[in-house]
Image (spheres, grey):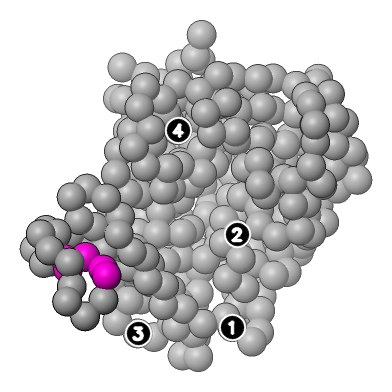
Amino acid sequence: MTTAITRARLEAARVLVVGDAMLDRYWFGQVERISPEAPVPVVLVQREEERLGGAANVALNVRRLGAGATLLTVMGDDEPAHALVRLLQREGVQRVLGQDPALRTTIKLRVVGRSQQLLRVDFENRPDHELLAQMLDDFERVLPEHDAVLFSDYGKGGLTHIARMIQLARSAGKPVLVDPKGRDFSRYAGASVITPNRSELATAVGPWDDEAQLAALATRLRAEQRIDNVLLTRSEEGMSLFDARGALHVSAQAQQVFDVTGAGDTVIATMAAMLAAGLSPREAVPIANRAAGIVVSRFGTANVTYEELFE
């Protein structure tokens, strides 16, 4: 049974999203022939679309659920950054933005033909310095206005050093959620919830052969890094929450998996919105699981509304 939450309670909640923002671009077209130059399809582009990606998509997921969302990020001073700002404004996401002329705002360009992704082209550069460290004062300034803090780490260099921000948020009594990347989870020490997928968790703690071994690895990770909850997303197997009470397993709800793009964003955004509204992690997990089941049945980075979850 999924815990219900009133719309008014959710609308009063505020989530601060910190991390790497990206611009998702889609070129949709027809494929009717193979190129004479190489054995590749020729796509006649008929429509172009821009969507929020990365941490910006996480903030959008929070907003679409009905909660308030603020995005704290650093962008370049380029055309994709300006497009991101326009989309954020249109969607009602509040912004605390830094600008770094040396940074190339990340673009993920997907070429789609016959409802199939044919190619993805990434445009980005890795910064040679810590980006968000320069925004620590801004983080401290807006922190009291929010009920939960969500760190969206895409491994682009923006969250290399987030220990101080986690410490500040926990000291202020805010739940801290992290979508992790990389082998070293020690930089997320003290977080309330981390949401790795199977590959990400195995990279950090090593592989497992059965559920007992998985539970032992998750328990050790929680103890070593003082992480309250490890929420493992398991695709067709659903989700598993490991906390002080043990393990909570929920089965996947997707009727048909069409595209898993952005499903992890939806999971952590839903968890953050529910925790910000006062639910416990165990109450929030079934709701996040339901949200994931909805978005994987859609194409591209998708979102879920309050009505779809509860009405």
Q: Nearer the viewer, residue 11 or 301?
A: 301
User: In this rendering, would 170 be left or right of 17?
Assistant: right
Answer few, some or many: residues within 10 Å of disc 3's Cα (few below 14, many 20 plus, some between 14 and 19): some
In the rendered structure, which amino acid carries the disc numbered 3?
A: Asp
What residue is shown with label 3?
Answer: 78
- Is label 3 in a helix, a strand or a loop? loop
What residue is shown with label 4?
Answer: 292
Labels 3 and 1: the sequence-earlier one? 3
For residue 173, say whether it is visible: no
CA distance separating discs 2 and 3: 22 Å
Residue 192 quadrant: top right
**Quarter of the picture holding the C terminus:** top left
Badges 3 and 1: C-beta atoms under 8 Å apart? no
Answer few, some or many: residues within 10 Å of disc 4's Cα (few below 14, many 20 plus, some between 14 and 19): many
Q: Nearer the viewer, residue 265 or 28?
A: 28
Answer few, some or many: residues within 10 Å of disc 1's Cα (few below 14, many 20 plus, some between 14 and 19): some
Q: Report if residue 181 lies within the magenta region.
A: no
- Is label 2 in a helix, a strand or a loop? loop
Q: Which mark is residue 214?
A: none
What segment is highlighted magenta in the picture?
Answer: 39-43
